[in-house]
Image (spheres, grey):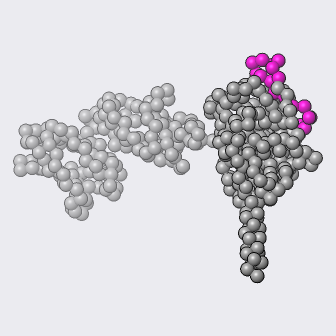
């Protein structure tokens, strides 16, 4: 009875261990699962998935095969087993290092690579394996058929394996990855954690690669949201677009869904768009029907609400208050911009007295579009514009008056300081301060309501009251 019980427990343990060898985890990219795998190579109780990330900007970028086996297998043995069942799969290496992977995209059955600096040097595969001259001779090989895919390297880039070595053991219930990493930085340099996976279909079950249909655009002045219908198992596409007047397509985007937002387009310009599907191993569909659209006209309206206030002998406050204003530019001749301001006011200083100035202002809209210039003209003050008050050999200048932001006081006399009071029409004291003689003082009254006030300047020897108008 005990033996029977122990045998039952042992059988249960073996069953559990055997079950745990199948692929149950979600892929490292967090999206792809075991159920997404379309082509399983080999037989056995152990399962893994091989993910090749080509980073060749051709797409689909990451291809996936399922792999089953018993006992123990190295990565190199897994590559050989996949090549034996998938005649489109090719690899290069020496058993411990891996130098390249390739795909016979059009399944022609003829696959070879040649050296870029010597096209006469050609390598032809033997059961999927391409053997070089040794000594890590993996750089500068190109697929003979331009429709096929081939990525190899050692000094210019390298294939990074999950096991770090082709002689490393394949782990069950795991995702085995190989990603090509370029030293030049020109490739995508994605890996199995952030690439979009595409399942490889069996060689005898090639699915027709259909072209995208039903292209629709939603257009603004500088962008277009393009959507379409893709009836293929994979959503990988290449979108091409150009200005309609151009002869050839100058821009392309690799996409893994059925929508694309084209940005930084020119306003009021006609564009053409066409799309090709990328299926399974990288074979492409026909081009879609051309979608043509015109971006909208962009209007950056001229600022209208501009004003000049607090004009003095040598300064003035320029105000620009306009709807949806984020920034504006100010110039005295439209050629040399003095400031680019995000504030509604700007103090224009160092002006000449009794001089007429024309200030030009334009709005800066998004993406550095500019409105037309608007202008306003004003004349700085001279002494005849000022309130010159004199008493007991003490005089002072009060300007501007009326005002809405600041008032300037200049005391001339032998006394060193003076008190200043501003009272409203009800004789209520609103503001007090102290100023010194022979120095122009600036008093901020921008917080006071509009109306009539009285400003009193005094000390032990002098007192004078003057009406001040705030508008």
Viewer can see residue 12: no
**Side (left or right) of 260 relative to 431:** right
For the point 7% across and 38% down, the residue is 414
Is 66 in the magenta?
no
**Side (left or right) of 8 relative to 429:** right
Closer to the camera, 38 or 413?
A: 38
For the point 73% across and 39% down, the residue is 54
Closer to the camera, 73 or 47?
A: 73
Q: Quadrant of residue 263?
A: top right
In the rendered image, residue 170, in percent from the top left (x then y), is placed at 72, 49
In the rendered image, residue 353, in percent from the top left (x then y), is placed at 30, 31
Quadrant for the N terminus in the image = bottom right
Q: Is residue 354 above or below residue 283?
A: above
In the rendered image, residue 338, in percent from the top left (x then y), is placed at 43, 32
Closer to the camera, 235 or 325?
A: 235
Is 115 in the magenta?
yes
Q: Quadrant of residue 359?
A: top left
**Side (left or right) of 67 relative to 390:** right
Closer to the camera, 67 or 149?
A: 67
Q: Residue furthest left?
A: 461
Viewer can see residue 471: yes
For the point 46% across and 27% down, the residue is 336
Query: How many numbered marks are there?
Result: 0
Stretch in magenta: 106-122
Q: Quadrant of residue 60?
A: top right
Q: Residue furthest right?
A: 204
For the point 75% across and 51% down, the residue is 72
Q: Is residue 63 above or below residue 382?
A: below
In the rendered image, residue 403, in percent from the top left (x then y), is placed at 32, 47
């Amino acid at each position: 009875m005990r033996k029977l019980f122990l045998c039952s427990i042992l059988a249960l343990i073996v069953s559990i261990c055997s079950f745990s060898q199948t692929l149950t985890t979600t892929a490292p990219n967090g999206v792809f699962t075991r159920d997404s795998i379309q082509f399983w190579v080999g037989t056995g109780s152990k399962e893994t998935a091989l993910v090749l990330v080509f980073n060749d900007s051709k797409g689909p970028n990451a291809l996936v095969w399922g792999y089953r086996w018993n006992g123990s297998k190295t990565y190199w043995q897994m590559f050989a087993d996949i090549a034996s069942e998938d005649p489109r799969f090719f690899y290069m290496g020496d058993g411990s290092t891996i130098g390249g992977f390739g795909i016979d995209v059009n399944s022609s059955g003829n696959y070879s690579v040649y050296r870029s600096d010597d096209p006469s040097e050609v390598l032809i595969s033997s059961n999927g394996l391409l053997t070089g001259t040794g000594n890590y001779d993996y750089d500068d090989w190109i697929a003979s058929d331009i429709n096929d895919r081939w990525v190899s390297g050692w000094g210019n880039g390298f294939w990074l394996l999950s096991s770090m070595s082709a002689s490393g053991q394949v782990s069950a219930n795991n995702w085995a990855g190989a990603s090509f990493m370029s030293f030049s930085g020109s490739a995508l340099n994605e890996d199995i954690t952030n690439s979009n996976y595409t399942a490889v279909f069996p060689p005898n079950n090639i699915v027709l690669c259909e072209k995208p249909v039903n292209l629709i655009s939603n257009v603004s002045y500088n962008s277009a949201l393009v959507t379409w219908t893709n009836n293929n198992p994979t959503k990988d596409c290449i979108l091409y677009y150009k200005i309609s007047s151009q002869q050839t397509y100058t821009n392309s985007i690799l996409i893994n869904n059925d929508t694309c937002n084209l940005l930084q387009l020119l306003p009021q310009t006609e564009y053409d768009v066409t799309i090709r599907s990328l299926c399974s191993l990288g074979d492409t569909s026909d081009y879609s029907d051309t979608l043509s659209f015109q971006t909208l006209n962009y209007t950056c309206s001229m600022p209208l609400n501009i004003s000049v206030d607090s004009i003095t002998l040598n300064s003035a406050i320029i105000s620009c208050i306009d709807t949806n204003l984020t920034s504006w530019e100010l110039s005295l001749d439209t050629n040399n911009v003095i400031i680019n301001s995000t504030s509604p006011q700007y103090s224009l200083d160092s002006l000449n007295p009794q001089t007429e100035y024309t200030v030009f202002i334009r709005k800066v809209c998004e993406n550095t579009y500019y409105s037309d210039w608007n202008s306003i003209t004003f004349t700085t003050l001279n002494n005849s514009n000022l309130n010159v008050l004199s008493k007991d050999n003490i005089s002072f200048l009060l300007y501007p008056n009326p005002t809405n932001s600041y008032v300037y006081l200049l005391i001339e006399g032998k006394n060193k300081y003076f008190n200043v009071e501003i009272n409203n029409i009800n004789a209520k004291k609103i503001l007090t301060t102290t100023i010194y003689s022979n120095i122009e003082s600036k008093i901020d009254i921008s917080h006071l309501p509009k109306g009539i006030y009285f400003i009193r300047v005094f000390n032990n020897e002098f007192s004078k009251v003057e009406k001040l108008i705030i508008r």
